[in-house]
Image (cartoon, rainbow, N blue to C red):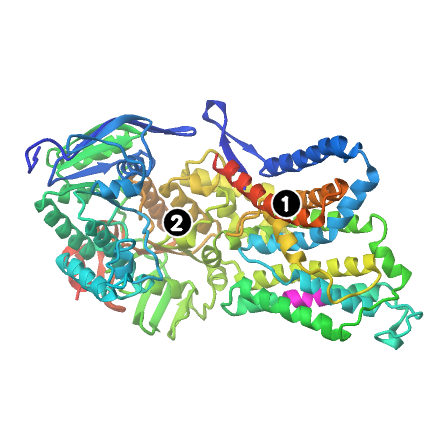
Amino acid sequence: MASTRTGAGGRPRRFPPEASILMVLIGLALAFELLGWIFVGQSFLLNEQRLVVMILQVSVIGIIAVGVTQVIITGGIDLSSGSVVALTAMVAASLAQSSDAARAVYPSLTDMPVLVPVLAGLAGGAAAGLLNGTLIAGTSIPPFIATLGVMVTARGLAKWYTHGEPVSMLTDRYADIGGGALPVMIFLATALIFHIALRYTRYGKLTYAIGANPQAARVAGIPVARHLIAVYTIAGTLSGLAGIVTSARAVSGQAGMGTMYELDAIAAAVIGGASLAGGVGRITGTVIGTMILGVVTSGFTFLRIDAYYQEIVKGAIIVVAVIADQYRQRA
Amino acid sequence: MRNVAGDGWLLEVRNVCKAFPGVVALDDVSVRLGRGTVHALSGENGAGKSTLMKIVAGVYAPDAGELLLNGRDLRLRSPRDALNCGIAMIHQELNLMPCMSVAENIWIRREPINALGLISHRELKRRTRALLERLRIDIDPEAEVRTLPVAARQMVEIARALSYESQLLIMDEPTSALCERDAEHLFAIIRELKGQGKGILYITHRLEELFEIADELSVLRDGRYVGGGTPATLTREAIVRMMVGRELPPAAPVGEARRGAVLLAARHLTLERHFRDVSFELHAGEILGIAGLVGSGRTRLAEALFGLTRASSGRLSIGDREVKLDSPQSAISHGLAFVTEDRKESGCFLTLSVLENLEISVLHGDFVRCGFVRTRAVSEACTAMCALLRVKTPDLHEPIGNLSGGNQQKVLIGRCLLTRPKILILDEPTRGVDVAAKAEIHQLISRLVGEGTAVLLISSELPEILGMSDRIMVMREGRVTGILERAEADQVKIMDLAAA
């Protein structure tokens, strides 16, 4: 996955593939810095609080993107992440209500230890991922269709769970998960764990091999179906984790949470160099891709530009970043 | 040299140079092609043959030098340009659209149109039928390409190139996917095209073919023209020396069969529609060759032995135990290994490095601790394997896609050998591999057999089968039609058993 470029004397030199996308991140940040001095009269980067908020805003996307990157490396796609965030947010929140809640979902299960809603959220995510994986590995439906089905179903389940009512009045211990910089820590820890897993473990090697050539993987004796189920289950579990963080930050569970998160997560992975053709992608790239999304969002807010323009430009940046990356790889 | 039309050359390539980042692919190469002749280009993988062909076909523009077609300056901006000038190329990798019919593939973007401006399927079919009849190719114009065997697809590709009524045809290893009989058919077509005054540039690795159809030969090595002439005036050895630039290792030693105990025994193996009632025994220290035409069920049999598909009936035993192999994992754990016939399709992980391609089948046992790959141990084992197989690569981290076909094949064999197999199944192990690498692979197989490995060798090249095997099993339409000892086997006997 290291890109090869011919240096002086005809000997190939290797650059980490993230180098170019890191330049894009730095370039964007500097552009906002410059525009900040011109239009707002203050620094964009030299503001600790803004930086924390910036990463905080994208850490949920980042957690999902770590899972989605692995799915993309296998040559698949996961469209269900956003809906799974909503479903797990609802389930976790319903088990995290305090006894002050007027109409608790489970009146007998209030003031539970924080571990209960957390495990329930993770288990819900894992179950959704297991369903994705089983559908994909066990039948010949393409991942796009399988996860599209689960996406719609999970959103429906999230609404059905309380008939559309938000779940509020959560315990302080639960809300703490979303407080301070903890979501950022969770994001970075997740990224680190799976960066190591992809690079240094058997799990990672098999993931790349299956994505690079599923047929060759089978011939080489890799248990392809079992491994795909594992990868989708991990991605689902991470969506569950994102659902926990989301509901803890909002101190409530709502069925509309996480809408379009799956697309932001896919964008982060692809900006970070993951190839939808499979076999290519790195967590470090995905982290940088996530940061790029964060810089764009907070940069526009900082410049006080309308949210409409933000989306228009974000779309363009995703496409341009990927085109630039492909040029670099061909050069 | 013969030049049927008499007036000048059909194609002249003069002093062409082409460099890619880091490599000079062609250095001052000149080639001339007369009308009604076949000019063969030979050389090892990476010698520059394909680059030269692609320049003539308009895929690449040369950095220096010029092309002349019928004595006139030729500047091509795209493959489409080349087609319009009457130059058609048949690529080594098939470029057909699998989900479209034969007729649609052949006439793509030139479909006949009816009064309403829509595609006339009746006319399309009629034209295709006429074209295929003229070439004596027996394929249904309405068949979807993906349902056709490889040989038939190759024929469709050839028909498509000819449908442009080109004066110059470029063929890049057209026989590499064909069996002997289909190759003969192709040669008949080529002779007919020569008779019509068309010129053919022909790349091949198979020396036999040079003598069979080439009128003129040019050998390239490292991007330079190193020699050539009329094949009739050249010996096989002289050509090989030009291609390789050194003497080849001696041909695989033909030791007496060191046949040991029976390692693998198949009894009445059957897979509906593919093979039926196949029984044979494979001994330690022997090579059992499997000959047969494309479609005779050889590959399916190999896949069933390796657990990739399940035979519908019959029994299989390894050593003295009966086994059920329902996945490659179980086959590998019983000491089997399999090198597939299609490197690109089911062999290589093209986006991954040499190391990652080698290690993938041994990521368990001693090489993994608590899920973590023991990087040092694995790369030591892989380095040793690369040295053993003489894989030419800058280092283990080179993407395998940058290696030549022969070196990719060695890596795939290396992947199998790392699992320390007792039984090695090789399906076309030297397809698309240059002469030098081929000789090395043959030597390696002989050495493994000498160490007691049992080898099942499937090959469409009869000289390879005859030269390597201790015994030869011939298949026809899914049935075993005979098992010959080396001493009694020859090309005629095998073809008798293989052809209907």
Q: Position of residue B40 (x, y in %)?
A: 19, 38
Q: Amino acid at mark 2?
A: Glu
Give the label on residue A313, or none: 1
Mark 1 Cα-neighbour bin, 10 Å: few <14, some 14–19, many ≥20: some
Residue numbers of the magenta segment? A124-130
Which residue position is annotated with label 2? Answer: B451
| Residue at the image point whose x is 88% and y is 76% from the top | A107
Are discs 1 and 2 less than 8 Å apart at CB? no
| Residue at the image point whose x is 22% and y is 59% from the top | B485
SS at badge 1: helix
Quarter of the image for residue B311 reads bottom left
Q: Nearer the viewer, residue B422 or A205?
A: A205
Residue A110 lies within the magenta run:
no
Q: Nearer the viewer, residue A242 or B205?
A: A242
Q: Is residue A169 left or right of residue B18?
A: right
Residue B127 visible in the snapshot: yes
Q: Amino acid at mark 1?
A: Val
Question: Which chain is mark 1 on?
Answer: A
Q: Nearer the viewer, residue B101 or A195?
A: B101
Q: Nearer the viewer, mark 1 or mark 2?
A: 1
For the N terminus of chain A, the image quarter is: top right
| Count of picture labels | 2
Q: Is residue A212 left or right of residue A260?
A: left
SS at badge 2: loop
Q: Position of residue B161 (x, y in %)?
A: 23, 49
Give the label on residue A142, or none: none
Q: Position of residue A35 (x, y in %)?
A: 72, 33
Q: Position of residue A261 (x, y in %)?
A: 67, 57
Question: Which chain is mark 2 on?
Answer: B
Q: Nearer the viewer, residue A251 or B34?
A: A251
